[in-house]
Image (cartoon, rainbow, N blue to C red):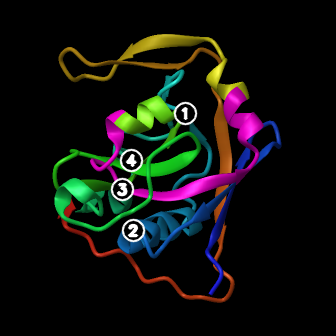
Amino acid sequence: MKNPIATMIMNNGNKIKIELYPYEAPNTVNSFIYLANKGAFDNKDIKRLVPGFVIQPVYDEFKENEDYRYEIDGEFRENGFNNRLKLEKGVIAMGGDGKEIASGSCYFITLSDEAGEKLNGKYPGFGRIIEGYEEIERIEKVETKPVDIGIEGVIVNKPVVPETIKSVRVEAFSHNYDKPIIKNIV
């Protein structure tokens, strides 16, 4: 069976292709596919950019749409799940608490092997960029500004000029992926 391929199209027309690995994090992949194909990731500005660390399109659990605000079991090693995908440059993972849960929607792209070493085992890796990494490198270099996200002591950087993901769609090669198993609604 072929692995599903997610295609992220930026507003400038550039494409980023991501191979998803359902055998490493099956429910995480189900969640990503479910939300991508519902259009949940469309027309989203990148919310967090830390050069050399991560690009995170969404970190707010979709405050504007309750249907997309949920958590799933964390499919990562520190939670006892045998996810062998090493977080390193170009790997996509799902955010969460780093202990037992993962967000159903707040994914990030790891920008360096060093960042991956800090995150490894605490977040479920579920895919890898296979085409278009030069677009990630371009985004990583844009000017950012600090933003207070309402959590004491936590400031994130976001692009000064919005970097918008126009759409994310997944080619599943005729395989039907299940709806994700939700642990908590947030």
Label annotation for residue 111: 1
The residue at the point 39 percent across, 68 percent down is 25
x, y (%) of residue 1?
Answer: 62, 87
Residue 86 shows in this picture: yes
For the residues carrying marks 1 and 4, which lies nearer the camera in this image? 1
Of the numbered discs 2 and 1, the one sitting upstream in the chain is 2
Distance Cα–Cα, label 1 vs label 4: 23 Å
Q: Amino acid at mark 4?
A: Phe
x, y (%) of residue 123?
Answer: 32, 50
Residue to which mark 3 is pinned: 124
Of the numbered discs 1 and 4, the one sitting upstream in the chain is 4
Residue to which mark 4 is pinned: 62
| Whether residue 26 is situated above or below residue 64 in the rendered picture | below
Distance Cα–Cα, label 2 vs label 1: 20 Å
The residue at the point 53 percent across, 48 percent down is 91
Q: Are marks 2 and 1 in contact (CB under 8 Å)?
A: no
Residue to which mark 2 is pinned: 25
Label 4 crowd bin: few (<14), some (14–19), many (20+), radius 10 Å: some
Of the numbered discs 3 and 1, the one sitting upstream in the chain is 1
Could you say which is closer to the camera, residue 64 or residue 29? 29
Of the numbered discs 2 and 4, the one sitting upstream in the chain is 2
Of the numbered discs 3 and 2, the one sitting upstream in the chain is 2
Q: Amino acid at mark 2?
A: Ala
Distance Cα–Cα, label 4 vs label 3: 19 Å
Q: Are marks 3 and 1 in contact (CB under 8 Å)?
A: no
> What are the residue bounds of the magenta stretch?
118-137
Q: Are marks 1 and 4 in contact (CB under 8 Å)?
A: no
Distance Cα–Cα, label 2 vs label 4: 22 Å
